Amino acid sequence: MIDLSVVIPSYENAALLEGCLAALARARAAHPALRFEVLVVDNGSRDGSAERAAASTLGVRLIALARNRGFAAAVNMGLRARHGRHVLLLNSDAEIEPGVLVGGVAWLDGEADVGVVGAGLLHPDGREQRSVHALPGWTSELLPDRFVRWGRRRLRDRASAAPRGRARAGAVPVGGEGGGAHRSGARAIGGGQDVEAVRGAVFFMAGDLVEALGGLDEGYFFFLEETDYCARVRDAGRRVVYAPGLRAIHRLGASSKARAPLATRIEYERSLDRFLARRRGPGVARLVRGLRLLRGVGGLVLLGLAAPLSGRLRSRLRERAGLLLWHLRGRPAEPVLADVLASRASGEGTPI
């Protein structure tokens, strides 16, 4: 039986996808006892992503979609096609360290109440990225970022001070039901911390819960789909764990925000509104909408004062102004992120 299905949704990220697959090849060479498959779900890319995935020495199972159906829909296509006991949802711009796969499987096999395990994400220069976060609500809109950073430091300090060996990967068979080798070097890092949500770049999912919950909510085109899944995991009585010792480089250079900054921000607003309305109630969603509108006006004023000093700030000013205008127009259905990205991929239009 296959231990793990690695599902990689990809869109216009051919070069980064190669790095992602190369890291998986190194993991296979380092831990040959772990049985895993790789499924790449290409969302209608035009940059040769599908061809590069098919040519990989990993024996990638390629699912090529004719158009960009969104992150959640692509993930669910991979989930339906999988053969593994557990799932790793892996971003195409993430490169895992060799022990991450065995570590994630050890967590899920070793602690039956764990539903999701998230890795510690790093910038290419080694700086830490935000890997965990609270579920969105009205309080998160009121707290300044410095309190968020303080909370991250507290979480890291608590994880460092916790006793080792929580998931005891050295005593967990990596082969699952079929037996397999005990991998003393494949430790699910002790000191893992229960959190509300983890970032979805390296996102382990317990297979039985994937079946029970039905995958990601396709009502989210992009953003917060993995946050919503974490909330549903907790609703089901299972744990969401941040395991900082499972590390991966997360490259953000070719993100949708870089290619279509305004349309990407608008898509985040739509996803946030959906999450809040479904999880917190329509009243909270309206409150947060108003708070973000007020904050947007204030940010626009401050950026306007500073914009003459920096070209980068002028770009942010245009972006904020466009977002504010979208709010004032009643949050229309346009622009659609998928259409904007497709236009950019074909060389038409300008970033929006």
Image (cartoon, rainbow, N blue to C red):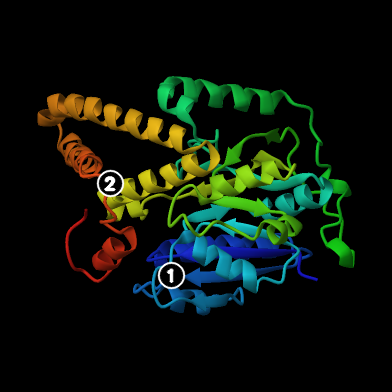
Instruction: Say which element carries label 2.
Output: loop
Give the farthest residue toward the front: 283
- Mark 1 highlights which residue? 43
Which residue lies at the image location 63% right of the left edge and 70% below the top edge?
80
Does residue 111 appear to the left or right of 268 in the view shown?
A: right
Residue 180 can be seen in this image? no
x and y, in percent, of residue 250 in the image: 48, 49
x and y, in percent, of residue 63 in the image: 53, 76
Instruction: Say which element carries label 1.
Output: loop
- Mark 2 highlights which residue? 331
Whether 283 is drawn above or below 201: the answer is above
x and y, in percent, of residue 98 in the image: 65, 55
Which residue lies at the image location 53% right of the left edge and 55% below the top edge?
95
Which three-letter amino acid code belongs to the residue tagged 1?
Asn
- Judge the density around disc 2: few (<14), some (14-19), many (≥20) Cα neighbours within 10 Å: some
Q: Quadrant of the N terminus?
A: bottom right
Q: Looking at the picture, tell me which residue is in the foreground, 26 or 246.
A: 246
Q: Looking at the picture, tell me which residue is in the foreground, 327 or 230.
A: 327
Of label 1 and label 2, which has the lower sequence position? Answer: 1
